[in-house]
Each structure stands twice: as C-alpha cells, then as structure tokens.
Image: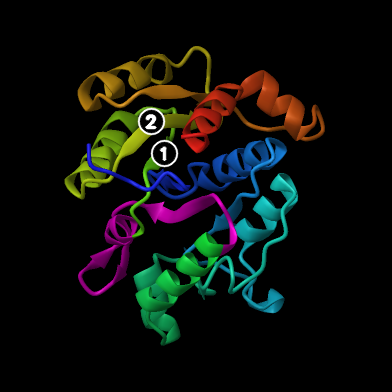
Amino acid sequence: MVAYSNNGLFIAGTDTEVGKTFVSAILLRILRRQGINATYFKPVATGCPAGRGLLPEDLAFVQDLAGVELSEPHHCPIRYEKPLAPMAAAELEGHPVSVEEIIRAFDALRKESPFLIVEGVGGVMVPLGKDYLLVDLMEQFGLPCLVVARPSLGTINHTLLSIRALQNKSITVLGFVTNGKKDPTDEAAATSPSLISRFSRIPFLGHIPIFQPQAESIDAFIESKASFLYDFIGAFAAC
C-alpha cells in the first residue's frame, strides 16, 4: 500500500448508474453533521441539461441531499450535454476534456475545504481523452477510494476488474459497497460480496438499499440502513 492523502475520498464505480452520487451525498451529509466542512467535487459530468445551463443533475442531487451549497464550474468544471462517455461527448461537442482545468479546480477546493468527496464518472476505465482514462486522473489526485458496485449477478467480474485496475495504478482501495435494489432470495447478491473480498482482499462494508423519501427521512435512512458508513468515514476522516 502506498502513501495517500487522507483529506479526501474518491467514490469510484464499477459502472454507470451504480449509485456513486447517492453514496457521495450520504458521506458528505455524515461528514457535515459531524462538524467537518467537507465539500463535493465532480471533475466531469455528461448528460447535463442544456436548458439549465449544463447544470449537472448529480450536483443538484448532492446539494439537496447533503445540504451543501454547490455551483458549477467550481464543483464540476467539465460538463457535456450528451449522455455519453466523456471522450465521446467531447468529440461530438467539439471541446476536449481539459485535465489542467480539472486539476486547477481540484486544487482550489482543497485549499477551501478540509475534506473532499470526489465522484467519478462511469466506471474507472472510462476514457477522458487520448490515452487518458479516469483511473489516470484518480492517480493524479492521489486520493484513496471507495468502490460502489451492483449487488446483482455479474458484479464479481465487474468489481474485481475495477479493483485490479485501481491497484495497478497504486490507488488505495479502502473498501467496497453494493447499492440498489436487492432481492433477498437472490443467491448471487448474497454470495458475491464475500467472494469479491476473498479474491481482492478488500473489505466489504455493506449494502445500501433503495432510499424511499416518502417512507423516512434521509437521516433515519442512514442510521437504520447505512450506519456502517458512519464508522467508515468517521474513522477515515479523523486520521
């Protein structure tokens, strides 16, 4: 394990739509409730509504759920309208991903806030530019990461490949979680986490189910269904 910065955490996913934004928002809310003036950073976002000035939906979601004020381009410097991989969207829209712009925004936020929750885009091997993947950007950030995975059949392969790609770049993986709807009778969902941990030697922190705001508050949800994140982020941020 190499040395890493402990004033931030990268939330990586095994795929798109696995729950990275939700997990990011929960962790940010926990940190702020504990008195840590943490903030959120999304280096690249695609599928941003043109009618709203390319305001990323992820940014708005995190702002509402975590109760923190966010703005673009401060917290999300690179934005595209097309709901595609960043490199594909960049080529179609005519302006490439600027890694320099991302790093400038990242460094500025680190000076303003004692702790950053950084959310990836898609999976860790998504292309950002010529010969440059998300995992390369993660390596530049120097942050450890938490991997968010699906609970369903196929997640063993996706998660192990993602962890291997991160470890090949000497990125510290602190743990992984599963997120989303899980059928209690699904044997794949029940057995996959232990196999992933066995082969990767990365701890499984727990499963986060679907949040139903009409049934309970977000704080009640976290305390009853994702309390393991309190212990995880509290211990890490205090290091």
Image position of 166 (left or right of 118): left
Question: Residue 10, relative to residue 93: is it above or below?
Answer: above
Residue at x 72%, y 59% (from the top left corner): 69
Name the colouring of the figure. Answer: rainbow
Q: Which residues are magenta?
A: 112-140
Instruction: Name the amino acid type tagged 2.
Output: Gly
Query: Is residue 132 found inside the magenta-colored segment of the image?
Result: yes
Decide: few, some or many residues near mark 2? Use Cα within 10 Å; few <14, some 14-19, many ≥20: some
Can you tell which mark lies on residue 137? none
Q: Quadrant of the N terminus?
A: top left
> Residue reaching furthest left?
168
Quadrant assignment, res 51: bottom right
Kindly identify which residue carries mark 1.
Answer: 146
Kindly identify which residue carries mark 2.
Answer: 175
Asked if labels 2 and 1 touch by Cβ distance under 8 angstroms, the answer is yes
Residue 99 image offset from top left, x and y in percent: 36, 74
Question: Residue 119, relative to residue 234: is it above or below?
Answer: below
